[in-house]
Amino acid sequence: MKIPLVVILGRPNVGKSTLFNRLTKSKLAIVDDVSGVTRDRIYGEVEWNGKIFRIMDTGGYVPDSDDLFEIAIKEQVKIAIEEADAILFVTDGRAGVLPVDADIANMLRLSDKPSFILVNKSDNDTQSLNKNDFYSLGIDHVYDIAAISGRNVGDLLDTLVNSINFPDDYLDEDVRLKISVIGRPNVGKSSLTNALLGSDRSIVTDIPGTTRDSINSTLKYYGEEIILVDTAGLRKKAKVQENIEFYSNVRTFRAIADCDVAVILLDSRFGLENQDQKIIDEAVRRRKGIILAVNKWDLVEKQTNTAKQFEDSIRFDLGTVDYLPIIFISALSKQRIFKIIDLAKSIREERKKKIPTSVLNETLLPEIAITPPPSTSRGKEIKIKYITQVGEKYPIFLIFANDPNSISDSYRRFVEKLIRRHFGFFGVPITVSFKDKNPIEE
């Protein structure tokens, strides 16, 4: 299943995040009048007229100088052109055509990707006349829009979905287990993939970001075909360091979205770092199976820092995401690398596991009765009546109560821990949702 990717790009403070929020019907992107507010890359999905595509808000930059600004924008455009199936180039109709807009348009014209100039902040018919200036950039598709109100966004989407190549089978399910190897640059992703496959499908060097393309490989494991995706960044170091992270994030986002189980590699010399946590958060948000694999363990295992101490430290940093398996490996010596495959197969089964409704209620309701949700601020007693599991792709538990809006997040975590204690779901994010109706009583 390969869903097309549409990238939003442009100068800071032209309205990219506002457009992203409107298209995804969310508020994931921070919107502010200060340029460069969006620092992290944000991803979502859009459905329009029965078609589904992924969208990425590339954010903005706060440059130290005009030269750095131009370099940063150009580097980001190059990456977007290579990765995207279509590009939404957002401009500011009130500011008019700026030199950097012309530079971006030149790069888009040289690509073979469908590109659209969006003249944003065109709130009425008078302001929409500003779009005429943008035809000088030489791109056929020019739309005057107002991202904040949605003006003309529907017309844009009609043309956009007709310009993207949606294969007939792009939503078809591939039943083979799909494992994505994910992590920071130079953590050993390519080395692990090569070790599992027994061949050098990926270039391995000490330079961070050596692998340019994601390489889908088929691993035959005891007669079963398993898809491995090796993700990484640039063939050579970019001029702007932040764009290495941008490129890596594009790869990581696609790999997480397409996999069943994400193997997140950590470097044993550094432990769990901020970027690792962001990758884990994205995998949890998308409800993928997750394995934490601590690579290069052969470099530290003989030191005083034992595996138990190391694991305890990681679990402390993980906080509520304490249900992930942690395995210590060495891609170089192949130490325990095939245990990753066995774990991934087990986690796939955990994601598909269905607990009968009768078993859920017989097991959980007595314990919930002992520790019920706290009463509301008005003194109203909250009663949980019924629990059932739904969801085809990952476990979702619906819990019906008389006042679900008054149940706290801490109690939701308590119920999740009850579910895990009795039924497992090791390595699998689950959703616990409180509802205000009991379907049996309808």
Image (tube, grey):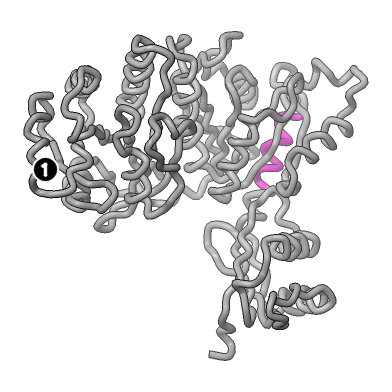
Residue 375 sits in which quadrant? bottom right
Q: Residue at x 27, y 46 (%)?
A: 147
Near mark 1 (Cα within 10 A), the count class, few <14, some 14-19 or many ≥20, is some
Q: Is residue 185 above or below residue 161?
A: above
- Using the image as rendered, state which of residue 303 and residue 17 is in the foreground: 17
- Using the image as rendered, state which of residue 347 and residue 369 is in the foreground: 369
Residue 383 shows in the view: no
Does the magenta run of residues contain 69? no
- Counting from the top left corner in percent of width and height, residue 269 is at 76, 19
Q: Main secondary structure of the magenta part?
A: helix
- Counting from the top left corner in percent of width and height, residue 196 is at 63, 27
Q: Is residue 66 above or below residue 130?
A: above
* Numbered range of the magenta stretch: 336-345
Q: Amino acid at mark 1?
A: Ser
Q: Residue at x 70, y 56 (%)?
A: 425
Q: Residue at x 56, y 45 (%)?
A: 260
- Counting from the top left corner in percent of width and height, residue 207 is at 57, 9
Residue to which mark 1 is pinned: 128
Residue 137 sits in which quadrant? top left
Residue 384 shows in the view: yes
- Left/right placement of residue 119 relative to residue 399 reads left
Q: Is residue 223 above or below residue 347?
A: above
- Counting from the top left corner in percent of width and height, residue 146 is at 22, 46
Q: Residue at x 23, y 29 (%)?
A: 113
Element type at mark 1? helix
- Using the image as rendered, state which of residue 182 and residue 243 is in the foreground: 243
Q: How many marks?
A: 1
